[in-house]
Amino acid sequence: MRRRARAGSERGAALAAALVALAVSAALVAGLADVVRTEIILARERRAMVEALAAADACIAQSLTALPVGWDFEPLLLGPDGARSTPDDGTLATPTGCSGHAARAPGTPDPPRVLLAIDALAGEGRRLLEAIIGRDPAPASPALLWTTLPPFPDAVTGMMVLEGADVDPEAPDLPGLAAPTTPTELDAWVAAEGPHVAPSPRTPAPVQAPLPPLSALATRAEAARPAGAEVLVSQGTPPSPPALALVRGDLVISDARQGSGLLLVEGALDIRGSLDFTGLVVAAGGLRIAEGAALGVVGALWLGEPGAPGAPVAPLAVAGRLALRQSRAAIVTADGLLALPRRAVLRGLRDVG
Amino acid sequence: MRSGAQRGTALLEQLVGTMLALLVLGTLVAVVGTGSGLLVAVAARGETEDTVQLAVEALTFDVRRAGYDPAAAGVPAVSEARTDRLTLAADLNGDGTVAASSEETTAYVCALPAQQLSRIIGRQSLPLAGGVLACGFRYLDATGTPLAVPPAGLDVPDRSRIRAVGLDLTLRLRGTPTTRRVVVALRTSP
């Protein structure tokens, strides 16, 4: 009996010790689990917040890219119907996953700017931002060649030379081509043209850009009392000072000409001789360069959509030679003759919630 | 003999049992001690990481909105740029002015003697992190190149070149120090 009682007592002590150890261990594990669980929840919340913030930033960046270049934001503020105080005022095209609305910024209308309210959702997170969008103070072309359409296949049977580097070492290199289509399609076009298109090593890849506002530019040029094609003087004669030239209809260059400033052709620019131009050349009806002919532009070339709307024809047909080289100074000079449209840029933002 | 043998055996049993019990108890104490240490270390590390992250989030929030100027009044994003002190400005109510006594003016101060990073909103100072071992601000231009900061801080022309603000922060509340290096870009265009 005594031995049995002792044995029972020993068993009880071991059980109690084991239970105490188990309880202490359980408490430790529970504490550790609680700490880890809290940290995991915090990390998840932070990740959701960061993802939503990145989504909101991306939404603003994509909306900015899609905004047309221009001089102000009235078309955006008036909405698709172009009328003030209607429900579509400030309607903003946004990518999937976010929504936005544009409103007039407080204060004076100059400099032109607009207030964007962006609501972005990403995963479990949601962020609200307010962004101020303005116009780039510096005139710039998105590329050496900016067209309303991607060039058609075999548009260049001659030679197109693109030099994105500027003599100004502070000027960033300029892409060779910009059009309202994906960079992939533009890359494919450049590749398909083969040796006919020769971008220099410092010419960045093509970029997507909204339509150049050629009709609005022509309207402004009309009001600026422009000169005509007479500013294009024969090569070999003393160069004329930079000028704003507006040509109504097509312009055919049959001999050797030169000029500088801003040349705006409302129709097609047809090169059958040679033309050297320093500044901005705009051909709303497209560009044709005949075999053996040459066009050299130090600055940028903007091409419009020839043909009727919905039935476009090639904006570019180069059987001769087209050489484009960046010059920020030439674009600034052209901007001094006629204010060029500016791209939209982010001027500031704040997180609302 | 049997009785003596029984007594001897009982004593030996007791000794062995005690030793075994001590061994088990010692192991238990060691395990519990290690577990407790681990729990404390994990909790301390979590607290340190949380503190650093909160500081980074606050700085990110303020730098992103610095220079917010809907009225186009010419609000500079950074009004003071030193290695130990940063002051940011924003016109949050769109009235064209930056009130020094409101959240439109936000400063960050690295006070190493006090081992503290503070966020000063208007005139209200809020400790953001304690146990600060190292703390400093960096300023980067448009190319990502750090600007050399004189002891008196950057002057106005150099401050206008700032495109991003960096914070290098090391702190230790308990246990292992935690270091975070972060760069936040200003959202204003030059």
Image (cartoon, grey):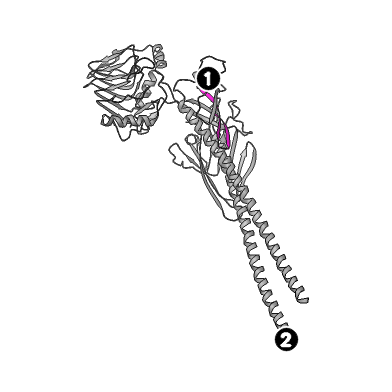
Viewer-proximal residue among A276 and B123: A276
Chain that bears disc 2: B
Span highlighted in magenta in the image: A113-130
Q: Which mark is on residue B61?
A: none
Instruction: Indicate the position of residue B136 as horizontal and vertical percent values.
Output: 53, 46
Question: Residue extending furthest right?
Answer: A1
Mark 1, secondary structure of its residue = helix
Disc 2 to disc 1, C-alpha distance: 110 Å
Q: Nearer the viewer, mark 2 or mark 1?
A: 2
Give the residue displayed 30% in from the left and 33% down from the top.
A200
Left or right relative to A277: residue A345:
right
Where in the figure is residue A286, as x and y percent of width and height?
Answer: 32, 18
Bin the neighbour count of mark 2 within 10 Å (Cα to Cα): few under 14, some 14-19, many 20 and up: few
Q: Residues within 10 Å of mark 1 (few under 14, many from 20)?
A: many
| Residue under the image location 52 percent in, 34 percent down | A55
Which residue carries the number 1 mark?
A77
Residue at mark 1: chain:
A
**Which amino acid does the dot numbered 2 rest on?**
Arg
Q: Quadrant of the N terminus of chain A?
A: bottom right
Magenta part, dominant SS: strand
Query: Residue A189: x percent and y percent?
Result: 33, 29
At horizontal 59% and vertical 47% (from top left) the residue drawn is A40
- Judge whether B161 appears above or below A156 on screen: below
Q: Is B108 on the left or on the right of A316, as rendered?
A: right
Q: Is residue B79 visible?
A: no
* In the rendered image, residues at marks 2 and 1 fall on the same chain: no
Disc 2 marks which residue?
A: B2
- Tell whether A250 sits left or right of A22: left
Q: What's the amino acid at mark 1?
A: Leu
